[in-house]
Amino acid sequence: MKEIAKEKQLPPVYAGKWATATDEEVQEELAKGTPFTYRFRVPKEGSLKINDLIRGEVSWNLDTLGDFVVMRSNGQPVYNFCVTVDDATMAITHVIRAEEHLPNTLRQALIYKALGFPMPSFAHVSLILAPDRSKLSKRHGATSVGQYREMGYLPQAIVNYLALLGWSDGTNDEFFTLEQMVEKFSIDRVNKSGAIFDSVKLRWMNGLHLKALPTDELLKSVGEQWRNAGILNESEGVFIEDAFKLLEGGMDLITDADKLLSDLLSYPFHATLSSSEGREILEDGLPAVAEILLAAYDSGELLGALEEGKSGWQKWVKAFGKSLKRKGKSLFMPLRVLLTGKLHGPDMGESIVLIYRAGTSGIVIPQVGFMTLEQRLESLKQVDWEAFSKVEPATVASH
């Protein structure tokens, strides 16, 4: 029957072969052991209407449905029958689900009426769409809630973001705690149109919720993240507190903390000087700055200043700038390159104090390949500046 309907491009409606059979015909088949199903006898004429809380009035012509199965030949009741009885006996008042369920609603509404159950209010929300406006699927990187947790997303950020897919409170507000959403939510502000899932916005939303956490709780999570990621061998202490304060502004996800700390601890000195931006610093008298910096290191003056922390560094760098007759960018850029190996990054003084302390405290796991400040300065003694000057700066190809 289904194949014939398909060929004629008609809806696959059951023709009702056994709906009018005599008792004798039925008994004959039962005696043979012929498998049978239970079907719902649908009225042949008329229509069914429901008032959907989101879509307004929705109606179906009953002649498009046909008698549908409520119990399979293996004795198992079907979904539409089970869910109706289940919801009715639990006194469910509102059924809110995806618009894909609209065809099921017709069957369920007929069962509610036939069994004399009060009909719940139905609300069919729009689907979540991919950026190309097709249905969101694994092909678009859709993933499970568990995976989002592993990726560093907070439950409250996921809930907040999902609530905004197709709903707003009528203001421009986007950040809501769970309690605020419970207070403000109303079904009449849910949109009919599909909402596009934007992973960039979800990440931004997570950043807002991350920053709203109590500092102690966030610090504890970040410390544990660094230890579990195999970067540090401790998850609490002064070093972790200071590193957290320096880097927290760049975190949208807890897992961002790994890259931020790894970048802070890295020393890509040769790669930086091989870049075109690095070449400008090199040509601005970098070897001369390196020579005076190494003299301050050999005399113990630099490390002594760093022992005092940021205030020691500030006093030292001021005097160092005076002796070189450099200040501002022409002083800090060469120092940043020589000590951190990078052209950009968080506050330089705090970064260098942390790098120094990471080397003296042994908090960094050896396998990370971290170069201590002393190892960096010793390596600068081996640099062949002339050879560096002859190397063509690396350019980035654009595709």
Image (tube, rainbow, N blue to C red):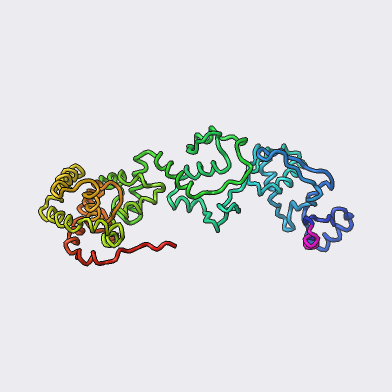
Magenta stretch mostly in which secondary structure?
A: helix
Query: Residue 340 in the image: x percent, y percent?
Result: 25, 54
Residue 304 shows up from this direction: yes
Query: Residue 14 in the image: x percent, y percent?
Result: 80, 55
Residue 358 shows up from this direction: no
Q: Is residue 177 or residue 281 the one in the foreground?
A: 281
Classify the position of the N terminus by image quarter: bottom right
Rendered residue at 36%/50% (across/down): 257
Q: Quadrant of residue 164?
A: top right
Q: How many marks?
A: 0
Query: Residue 285 in the image: x percent, y percent?
Result: 19, 56
Q: Is residue 269 or residue 108 the one in the foreground?
A: 269
| Image-based side of 142 in relation to 288, left or right | right
| Image-based side of 35 in relation to 234, left or right | right
> Within the magenta stretch, is there residue 8?
yes
Classify the position of the C terminus by image quarter: bottom left
Q: Is residue 338 or residue 81 the one in the foreground?
A: 338
Magenta segment boundaries in residue numbering: 3-9
| Image-based side of 176 in relation to 3, left or right | left
Q: Is residue 56 or residue 367 the one in the foreground?
A: 56
Rendered residue at 74%/51% (across/down): 70
Up/down of 205 relative to 378, above or below: above
> Within the magenta stretch, is there residue 71?
no
Q: Residue furthest top?
A: 183
Query: Residue 329 in the image: x percent, y percent?
Result: 25, 48
Rendered residue at 53%/34% (across/down): 171
